[in-house]
């Protein structure tokens, strides 16, 4: 299944408001004296350092769209592209902890803001300089990933690296059943085939489009796949299916974390 053809233009994808440029100019990724910002917990920050990465800055991309069927894909792509543009501004090797969410406002019933956020990171070498070329995506830009710091650590330890946070979406309308069909099924335990088939087809389309993005990104697989179901403003019989995951690829053995690297552990609380 091909991706949608009307992708955002390069100009729109790379657009950054002046306010963002000013904020980014004072982060660790822009100047040596800058401070990093992140949405990492303390534990994730420490673990990121053990994996050989340092945070540079909290990056964000946003797109406010009037909702239409096609908009659900394009608006998310715009938000992701603008988030990556901020990471490029900081010279990042990747973005970890990517979150993609929607926000509605009272001044627009049919308007949604699509927001992509994450923490831009840079790989460190023995000398302390960024040496993360091998960890970047095949196109040379920063990788994106929604993995937790713990899962990111494990992925690197296994000799693999994230490529891209990939998604596929399908807004599907399932036709109403006729009055006679509803009457015949009243009080009966039987499958409602038209709905089963519609839901099945919609999920398959979303998953296929997600896989197509991973193939386009030259990944070897996708981890952490999730299929979310949402109802928006199109009516009770129109539903969006959104498939997301992190596309990954394997690196050479020389990029594996050292055996002496600490292993993440789980703590099980005994409080009841």
Image (cartoon, helix red, strand yellow):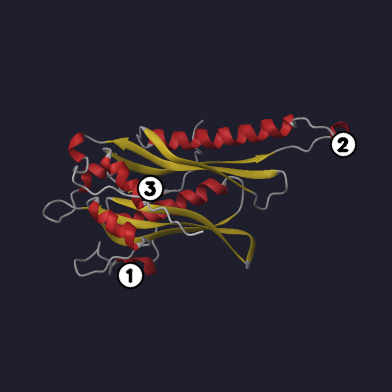
Residue 256 appears in which quarter of the rendering? top left
At x 65% / y 52%, what residue is drawn?
232
Q: Position of 88 compared to 74: left or right?
A: left
Residue 42 appears in which quarter of the rendering? bottom left
Secondary structure at numbered mark 3: loop
The 10 Å Cα crowd at callout 1, few under 14, some 14 to 19, many 20 or more, is few
Pick the residue in front: 6 or 172. 172
Q: Give the vertical position of 272 relative to 193 (above or below).
A: below
Which of the two discs, 1 and 2, labels the residue nearer the N terminus? 1
Which of the two discs, 2 and 3, labels the residue nearer the N terminus? 3
Circle nearer the viewer, 1 or 2: 2
Q: Position of 194 compared to 62: left or right?
A: right
Pick the residue in front: 59 or 224. 224
- Label for residue 179? 2
The 10 Å Cα crowd at callout 3, few under 14, some 14 to 19, many 20 or more, is many
Judging by the rendered image, the residue that carries numbered circle 3 is: 145
Q: CA distance from mark 1 to mark 3?
A: 25 Å
């Amino acid at each position: 299944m091909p991706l949608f053809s009307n992708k955002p233009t390069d100009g729109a994808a790379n657009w950054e408001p002046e306010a963002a440029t000013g904020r980014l100019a004072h982060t660790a990724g822009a100047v040596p004296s800058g401070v990093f910002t992140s949405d990492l917990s303390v534990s994730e920050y420490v673990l990121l350092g053990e994996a050989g990465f340092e945070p540079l800055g909290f990056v964000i991309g946003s797109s406010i769209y009037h909702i239409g069927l096609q908009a659900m894909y394009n608006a998310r792509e715009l938000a992701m592209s603008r988030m990556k543009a901020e990471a490029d501004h900081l010279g990042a090797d990747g973005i970890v902890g990517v979150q993609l969410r929607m926000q509605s406002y009272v001044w627009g019933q049919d308007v949604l803001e699509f927001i992509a956020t994450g923490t831009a990171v840079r790989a460190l070498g023995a000398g302390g300089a960024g040496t993360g070329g091998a960890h970047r995506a095949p196109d040379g830009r920063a990788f994106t990933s929604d993995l937790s710091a713990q899962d990111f650590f494990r992925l690197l330890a296994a000799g693999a690296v994230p490529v891209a946070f990939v998604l596929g979406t399908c807004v599907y309308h399932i036709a109403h059943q006729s009055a006679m069909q509803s009457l015949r099924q009243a009080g009966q335990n039987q499958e409602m085939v038209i709905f089963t088939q519609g839901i099945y087809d919609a999920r398959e389309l979303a998953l296929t489009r997600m896989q197509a993005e991973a193939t386009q990104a030259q990944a070897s697989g996708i981890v952490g796949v999730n299929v979310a179901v949402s109802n928006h403003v199109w009516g009770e019989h129109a539903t969006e299916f959104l498939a997301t995951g992190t596309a990954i690829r394997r690196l050479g053995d020389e990029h594996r974390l050292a055996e002496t690297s600490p292993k993440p552990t789980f703590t099980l609380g005994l409080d009841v």
